[in-house]
Amino acid sequence: MAPWTGNVHCTHRKGKHVSGDRHHHEHGHHHHTPSGLRHRLTHLLKPHSHESADKLDSALESSARGMRALWVSLAVLGVTAAAQAVVVVMSGSVALLGDTVHNTADALTAVPLGIAFMLGRRAATRRFTYGYGRAEDLAGLAIVLTIAASAAFAGWTAIERLLDPRPVQHVPAVAVAALVGFAGNEWVARYRIRVGRDIGSAALVADGLHARTDGFTSLAVLLGAGGSALGWQLADPVVGLAITAAIALVLRDAAREVFRRVMDAVDPALVDRAEHALREVEGVREVGELRLRWIGHRLRAEVAVVVDGDMTVRQSHAVAVEAEHALLHAVPRLTAALVHADPAPLPGEDDPHHTLAHHTAA
């Protein structure tokens, strides 16, 4: 066979290989960096599959966990907000009102996230060739807008009460409602953050952090109740303003996280890990351009590797397969990788990509 001078592509469908221009292959579940005997034993006891059905099962499982986390937290926060709302009507506390509104808004963020997880289950189409995973980014934007609206409402209510101070009624009930708010939010925060990190959902993690801050704002309501019990009427609206400031901090962090995801930002440590794994692959001389991007709560990779120019097509294909395999083991939540193999240049040889330069110039 003549020396290979092109690129390699392979898709795995039910154990068959289909050759083309590039190498593409999808992995049905997530791996961690291999480590000798333990890695081999893991493959013997639970061999991994390369079929698209397994990838779909993994996506459905992660989306199902996300949906479950949303509905459970929606129920918990709904009960918490309802209990607080009763006390708000009884007491007239604007600090507790701000906390209640924020808890209600936090519970309602389950709606756009739930829609996003449901859309993420849909298969890719000829129009949406990458699927619908980016719907989570849109849900993240909706969450940011919801947080902003709750901050504006809480701030406006607190300022109004500062201008027109009124005593808080049923202070003990306000204190109990504040503790209920803290307990409900902290439980929801731990649950959402744990599930969000497990499935790689930035939107769910951001929502969990949002709930955690809500818990601390509930404790601030407790301080306001204490001030009111001591006869300081301005304690309640002052705490309401403090809650508004806390919501604004959450808004900043959530907006930054969602902005990074929309702009395809990834943790640089993942890029370092991927490059290290590729350099360990036998036959890979150099690692060229490497790109990672989130699509929903799953990662995709595109990378160019340099191989020996005297390799045959089959040999180069084997290197490309092993390179992708190494990536799938090394990078958590990576479900697909596109590996482009370039032949090592010979002295005086023109760049084979020169004809593409005018298409890719910035």
Image (cartoon, rainbow, N blue to C red):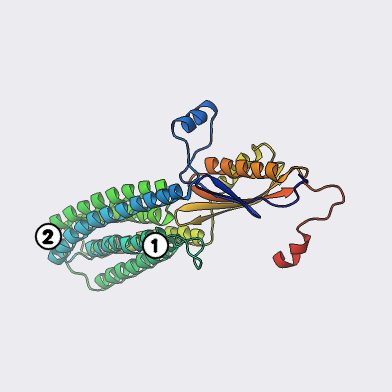
Left or right position of 210 against 307: left
Circle 2 SS class: loop
**Residue 105 percent coordinates (x, y):** 29, 64
At label 1, counting other C-alpha atoms closer than 10 Å, the crowd grade (few under 14, some 14-19, many 20 or more) is: some
Left or right position of 126 against 66: right
If the image is split into quadrants, where does the C terminus sit? bottom right
User: What's under tag 2, amino acid-wise?
Assistant: His
For disc 1, the marked residue is 119
**Residue 357 percent coordinates (x, y):** 75, 63
Left or right position of 146 against 331: left
Residue 249 in view, yes or no: no
Along the line of sight, which residue is nearer the eye, 33 or 6?
Answer: 6
Residue 177 in view, yes or no: yes
Mark 1 and mark 2 lie on one chain; the one further toward the N terminus is 1
| Residue 84 numbered tag | none
From what the image shows, is residue 197 above or below residue 258? above
Q: Residue placed at 21% from the left, 54% from the top?
A: 178
Q: Residue placed at 48% from the left, 39% from the top?
A: 48
Residue lying furthest top in this view?
37
Quarter of the image for residue 323 reads top right
Along the line of sight, which residue is nearer the eye, 33 or 191?
Answer: 33
**Residue 206 percent coordinates (x, y):** 40, 55
**Residue 214 percent coordinates (x, y):** 30, 56
At label 2, counting other C-alpha atoms closer than 10 Å, the crowd grade (few under 14, some 14-19, many 20 or more) is: some
Quarter of the image for residue 312 reads top right
For disc 2, the marked residue is 170
Quarter of the image for residue 97 reads bottom left
Q: Residue placed at 55% from the left, 28% from the top?
A: 36
User: What's under tag 1, amino acid-wise?
Assistant: Leu
Along the line of sight, which residue is nearer the eye, 259 or 52?
Answer: 52
Q: Nearer the viewer, mark 1 or mark 2?
A: 1
Circle 1 SS class: helix
